[in-house]
Image (cartoon, rainbow, N blue to C red):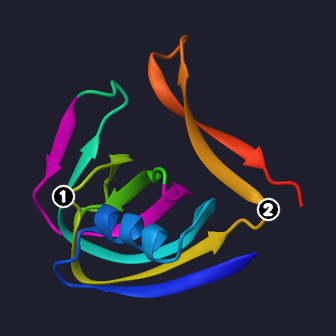
Amino acid sequence: MRTICKRLHQGDDLLRAVCDLAKEHNISAGVVLSAVGCISKGVVRDASGVTLRQINEPCEIVSLNGTVSTVRCHLHIALSREDLSTVGGHLVEGCIINTTCELVIGILDGWQIGTEYDVETGYDELIFRELTI
């Protein structure tokens, strides 16, 4: 596995930055290994798959995980509020870095991520293909 390390700066959009890294490094299949930092405000989608929730306060990033590729970045985030309560969901554009975010992405050699329509879920779902040499 290879890795990409990047420090994000104040004002960067977290999801946009991850997707840009995927394109810049032509990532066929990757995962977020670590993301340490904070946001000034955020937006997450809840489990309904429809409702967006605004987070209008500074929060620490306590977890960011998911898949990364040029096809799609599918990420979930957990955030700690000032009162130490936690909120999280599906990461969408609008999570804006406050001071910093130290991001580490692992590139999964020999794998490719694609999408395929799933009749059961009604969504284009990620599929994983092992590449043969």
Q: Residue at 47% across / 61% down in the picture?
A: 64
**Is 82 positioned to the left or the right of 49 in the image?**
left
Residue 45: which quarter of the image? Answer: top left
Look at the image and say whether residue 53 sits in the magenta stretch. yes
Dot in front, 1 or 2? 2
| Circle number at residue 127 | none
Q: Residue at 64% across / 81% down in the picture?
A: 3
- Residue with the mark numbered 1: 94
Question: Can you name the residue that lies furthest to the front here?
Answer: 133
Q: Position of residue 38 (x, y in %)?
A: 29, 75
Look at the image and say whether residue 110 sits in the magenta stretch. no
**Is 86 positioned to the left or the right of 9 in the image?**
right
- Residue with the mark numbered 2: 110
Find the distance from the CA under tag 1 to the CA under tag 2: 32 Å
* Up-down relation of residue 60 to residue 47 (above or below): below
Amino acid at dot 1:
Gly
Q: Position of residue 19 (x, y in %)?
A: 39, 64
Q: Tell me which segment is drawn in magenta.
A: 51-70
* Up-down relation of residue 105 to residue 91 (above or below): below
Tag 1, which secondary structure? loop
